[in-house]
Amino acid sequence: MARTDEFGEELADFVRRVGELKAARSVSADDLPAVLDAALFELDHAVSSLLPRYGQLASEGGGSGGRPVSTDRQEQQLLRAVFQRLPLPVALVDRECVVRRLNFAATNFTGVRAGYASGRPLTGLLAHADRAAFRSQVAAVARGEGDRGMTVHLQQRAHEPVRATLTGLRPGNEPRATVLVLLQPADGGSVTVRHGDDGSSVPVPDLTETSRHQAVVDLLDAMTRELLDAPAGDPPGVLRRAARVLHARFADWVVADAGAARLTRARVLGADDAAVRDIAAQDPATAPLVVEAARGGAPALLVRPEDPLALGTDASGAPVLVRADVTSLLCVPLIPSPGEPVEGVLTLFRSAGRPAFSMAEAQALDVMSRHIALAMRR
């Protein structure tokens, strides 16, 4: 029964990886070879591994689980301490790429706290084009098909290639194989790690935080002046003015939708003209996050969104989040005050290379959204 359950889990994971490969068809032409290689690899895995195992289980009726292995508590504590203090960024993941552990060096290297990363897929830290291929390689290592290595890109530093080395492990107290992921700069650069006196990681001071706060204050001032200058009786015009203020200085992409019961796309501002046209032609009713905001009036802040279809597909059929290379987004309904009708929805994207939206920035946009809604109703 244990072998049958394990095969069922592996088959379900295979189906999920195939779904991710389908969603990755819309990546740029330069990234398509990696996606194609991953697809061919999955097909080979289905023919050479899954099908024979299914026949074996059907004829034998499954098998017994693994034998229990005694472990030494002190040795486990020692190994955990060694793992945390390794000078190289390493992560321990399962075959579905879910993070089990992240050491101090990895938190500094990726900029993600270990408590946040644990229990979430490691692929959420990678660029969309790398996710499907990375998951396929992790699954292969977890199956015992040998160590692997590949070049990936972190969402927040997409211009810096990262070399990921994958090694399979079978801890004595774990029922399933796990994968150790070593991350290193692909250009051969070094990784520096700082520790406190108690051994904990010490974050590098962020000297740009004050500048970001001042930028938000300046943005609020610019938005107020724009709304005061906007003519009355032209809600779409007010929305377009607000989108211009938010674009570039606050977000890489701004998608403005007017209405609530029947949403209409009023303005799209972005970096790629072809993508702007395709996203502008999208029906807002096919974007789940936008519809949810328009109906329930609930804002959403997503960092490294995992579902590529959270905002639907554009006119070309590509997932909007993949097409715009979204690393974080804010989706905010335009409501003058709680309980009143929604006047529209603003969706803002940031792409790779730019810091993710913070809670403070989300709060500032929430304030601006109420002012925009009042100006639209004027």
Image (spheres, rainbow, N blue to C red):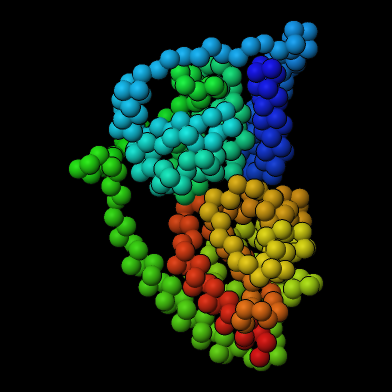
Residue name at image x 46 percent, y 31 percent? 92
Up/down of 132 relative to 43, above or below? below
The one nearer the camera, 134 or 168, is 168
In the displayed structure, does residue 298 sit left or right of residue 208?
right
**Residue 62 placement: quadrant:** top right
Residue name at image x 59 percent, y 19 percent? 143
Quadrant (top left, top right, bottom left, bottom right) of the N terminus: top right
- Name the spot of residue 21 as percent of width and height, x first: 68, 36
- Name the spot of residue 99 as percent of width and height, x first: 49, 36
- Name the spot of residue 296 as percent of width and height, x first: 69, 68
The one nearer the camera, 103 or 361, is 103
Q: Is residue 274 visible?
A: no
In the displayed structure, does residue 300 sit left or right of residue 7?
left
Residue name at image x 66 percent, y 48 percent? 308
Q: Is residue 49 visible?
A: yes
Up/down of 47 relative to 218, above or below? above
Up/down of 105 relative to 165, above or below? below
